[in-house]
Structure formats: C-alpha cells, structure tokens
Image (tube, rainbow, N blue to C red):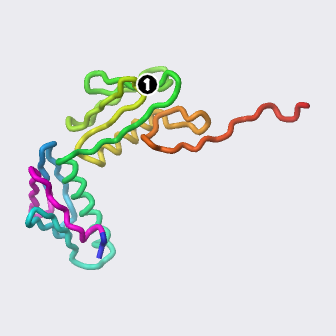
Amino acid sequence: MSRIGKMPITLPAKVSISVDKGNLVTVSGPKGQLKQQFDPDIKIEVENNQIKVQRPTDQREHRAQHGLTRALLANMVQGVSTGFSRRLEIRGVGYRAEKRGSNLVLSVGKSHPVEFAPPSADIAFDVDKDGRAFTITGIDKARIGELAAEIRRARPPEPYQGKGIRYEGEYVRQKAGKTGKAGKK
C-alpha cells in the first residue's frame, strides 16, 4: 500500500469538493476553484470532511497513480484554501525587478527589459521595495513552479560571480576563476 496514497486528506472549513463519474474533481474554496481529471480506475471518496483515495489492484500503474492522485488532490485543497508562493532573488550589479501593472519586468543585463505577464488571473507578482527579490503567488502549485522556472531561465545564476536569478535559499556552487598568466617568472 502506498504510504502517501493511504493517508486521508482533511478538508478545511469553506472548502468543497465534487467528484463526477469520470473522476473529474472540482475543488472550490475562498481563494478560487480548481478542476482536474484523474485516472478513472482510481476511486476517490468524500466522507466526513475527508477525502480518501483507493486503488483497485496492486498493479504497477495503479500503485503509481494512487500516490500521485492523493498528492495532486492535497495540493488542490491547499491551493484553494491557503494558496502557494515561490520566492526568487536577483543578484548582480544593476539587476532588478519591478512591477508594471500586473506584469513583472526584469532588468538582468540584457539589451532590453524582460517582461513576464501572469498566465492567469489567479497568479500575481509581488516585488520587494529594493527590487532584489519577488514572490509569485497563486492557487495552482504546478503553474507557479513552471512560471518560476521560466523566469529563472531568463538569467540563470552563473557559477563564477553568482549573478542571476535564483530561488530563495538555492545554493549555487562557486567555481574558481583564472589565477593569472601561467609560465611567467
């Protein structure tokens, strides 16, 4: 039995869930609404403010889908109740971020500013006053992670000086640069 899959998910107050015949799950809460289609073989039950996920057999595919379904459901419930956020830092001389309307504009050493628009209305950017860090917030954990990775790709941290965009708390291993001209006496 999957250790993740057999754990029940407790529904917080003001969060409702509905499961259709084809395992189309809709989760609604104070922050918004999320829908996702799951494998029809996996059984999703809602009873006593808890969601339970069960698999029909111990086949490899069913075992994999069991834990995955439970984890995705837990992320949906957490997203509509409290939401998710991802914080990124900018390091480098002259590198900064600013917010124009709902868009994020980055100055990261390119000939032009790099602009990112939120892919949906439930995703928002929040930039610190000094422009050295910003936060992406929303209800869908996967979309926030994908957007954070896309923004990081605009200027990934380089290993010699450490300049670039990195996740908060990310460790970037520094390489030693050249030590000078070799062979001179």
Where residue 170 sits: x, y (%)? 47, 44
Please provide percent x and percent y for residue 173: 58, 44
Most extreme residue toward the right, as rendered? 185
Is 175 left, or right, of 4 in this rendering? right
Name the residue rendered at 43%, 41% in the picture: 167
Q: Quadrant of residue 17?
A: bottom left
Quadrant location of the N terminus in the rendered image: bottom left
Left or right: where 152 falls relative to 43: right
Residue 2 located left or right of residue 11: right
Q: Position of residue 95 (x, y in %)?
A: 47, 25
Residue sitting at 23 percent across and 37 percent down? Answer: 120
Residue 5 shown in magenta = yes
Which residue corresponds to the image point at 24% horizontal and 71% vertical from the top-left? 6
| Left or right of 47 in this view: 144 | right
Residues shaded magenta: 4-25
Q: Which residue is mark 1?
A: 96
